[in-house]
Amino acid sequence: MNTTTTTTTAAAKRSSTLYMVELAMMIAIILLMSFTPLGYLRTPGLSITLLTIPVAVGAIILYAGIKLSRVIIRTMAISGAICGLAFGITSFMQCFGMGAFGTMLFSINPLGTAVVCIVPRLLEGWITGLIFAALYKSPAKKFSHYVASLACPLLNTFFFMGFLCLFFDNTDYIQGSVSSLGVSN
């Protein structure tokens, strides 16, 4: 066997192992934040999440190489999607008695609640990785970290609220909440 091939194979295995360990660490951080007070700021009727931070970090830093190529761009988007999926699954788990809003939504429409909790978070991580990869290859490289970091919570809010309106707009719970605030739609 050629020495160059052996060195390349060993470097690829180290890089792959490092990637899996870093991804596992990001998922562990998401799990830790989800089930401790670190991940959510609880207010009456609303939970503000800080879990977009590890999703953004995972989407930005988890790639297996320095030079951006199609494979690495896909890896970044997939890393963001996996971190977002972990966030979404833990968000859905909050609906089982850990959060009043999620529990109420789950009692109205369990399947809709699963979609509202999981799909927006998966899309948030995936698109954050794509945004970072696209900007990192462009002349705006020095702003790629900032833009992707800001895009992640904005995407989370946009997708979560969009899916919430899509699945729960015509329910008595949402309409009652809106009318109690003096707003009509």
Image: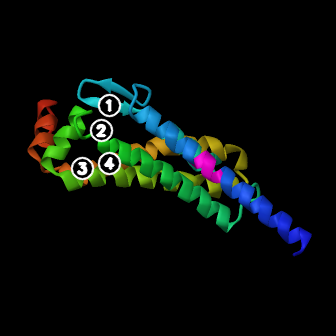
Contact? badges 2 and 4 (CB < 8 Å)? yes
In the image, what residue type sits under mark 3? Thr
Contact? badges 2 and 1 (CB < 8 Å)? yes
According to the image, label 3 marks what residue?
113
User: Is residue 141 rendered to the left or right of residue 95?
Assistant: right
According to the image, label 1 marks what residue?
47
Residue 63 sits above or below residue 44 on the image? below
Q: Which sits earlier in the primary sequence, circle 4 or circle 1?
A: 1
Q: Mark 2 falls on what kind of element?
A: loop
Q: Mark 4 falls on what kind of element?
A: helix
Residue at the location (63% across, 61% down)?
A: 73
The mark lying in front, picked from 2 and 1, is 2
Q: Quadrant of residue 122?
A: bottom left
The Cα–Cα distance between marks 3 and 4, rounded to whole angstroms, is 6 Å
Number of residues whose C-alpha sits closer than 10 Å to that of mark 4, classed few (under 14), some (14–19) or many (20 or more): many
Q: Position of residue 157 (x, y in %)?
A: 38, 43
According to the image, label 4 marks what residue?
117
The mark lying in front, picked from 2 and 4, is 2
Contact? badges 1 and 3 (CB < 8 Å)? no
Depth check, front residue: 125 or 10? 10
According to the image, label 2 marks what residue?
94
Residue at the location (85% across, 63% down)?
A: 7
The answer to if 182 sits in the magenta stretch is no
